[in-house]
Amino acid sequence: MPLVVVGSVAIDHVQTPTDRRDNLLGGSATHFSYAASFFTSVRLVGVVGDDWPAEHTAMLDARGIDTSGLHQVAGGKTFTWTGRYHDNMNDRDTLDVQLNVFGEFDPVLPEAYRRAKYVFLANGVPAVQMKVLSQVPGRRLAVADTMDLWINIAREDLDKLLTQLDGLVLNDSEAKLIAQTENLVTAGHRVKEMGPKFVIIKKGEHGAMFFSDHETYVLPAFPTPRVIDPTGAGDSFAGGMMGYLSEQDNFEPETLKTALAYGILVASFNVEGFGLERLQEITREDIEDRMAEYRKMLSF
């Protein structure tokens, strides 16, 4: 089933302890789309300026990602992010953010997108995320990401959004913040009680936690020794997960658990290169090979 994603499309400048890369194709919707494209057809909604390199759109098109929802603003500049990772490759400093056209992003979905059954709202303003949901009334599964900024400055809108979602994805610090507790298990259950049918807490190198009315569990990260650039790992995790759910066209508990595993594995490839470099090198077969290793790792 086609999968619609709405979010940022950006140009990234990334510094790590050993290297630096400028003008990388980035953004939450971009990483999500590429990850999901291993499993299903993806329809991307985003905004860029007229400085956007045409070769980026061509690459996404060649991947089979529908970019007819990517709006280019004449005279505008594309969202840019500059960040520097610490030696542990977990913590990072944002050195510069230029929202540019993304700061006034008011997504209007093409007519074909409005019939989507699977929708992912990448990190963004909760009021804008709700506007997107109103444009896909026939959706079967709507999942969103969020961040500490919206928890702090747009809590009322975020609370409204949570009541309209099937699933919410957030990291461990965000879960603690929104639930006002240091216990992640308590946090997961509290956030679920705010509206979503399920909540997924991303824990980076420690995997992910899942909470629903049916079950609570933790899946570990895949132990990759080669972490080059963690940028977009959370978005590629969500893309792998949602892509698999869309491919299977169901979200029963067992399918959800498998989808989480695929999300973890796609993210494990994502961190092995700058930007989308590593994902561009692999195939679905590579993901399946890693899945076989992962299943063996988890059996005892």
Image (cartoon, rainbow, N blue to C red):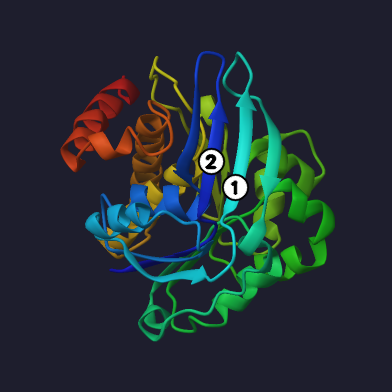
Height in image: 280 above or below 128? above
**Label 2 vs 1, first from the N-terminus:** 2
Whole-percent x, y for residue 193 in the image: 69, 59
Q: Are marks 2 and 1 in contact (CB under 8 Å)?
A: yes
Q: Could you classify mark 1 by the number of other residues whose Cα lies within 10 Å: few (under 14), some (14-19), or many (20 or more)?
A: many
Whole-percent x, y for residue 227 in the image: 44, 20
Q: Quadrant of the N terminus?
A: bottom left
Whole-percent x, y for residue 80 in the image: 59, 47
From where the camera sits, is residue 163 visible?
no
Q: Quadrant of the C terminus?
A: top left
Measure the alpha-carbon separation of dots 2 and 1.
6 Å
Q: Quadrant of residue 116?
A: bottom left
Q: Amino acid at mark 2?
A: Asp
Q: Amino acid at mark 1?
A: Thr
Residue, disc 2: 12
Q: Is residue 139 left or right of residue 188?
A: left
Height in image: 294 above or below 53? above
Tell which of 104 and 218 is nearer to you: 104
Whole-percent x, y for residue 187 in the image: 71, 43
Residue extending farthest to the front is 75
Residue, disc 1: 80
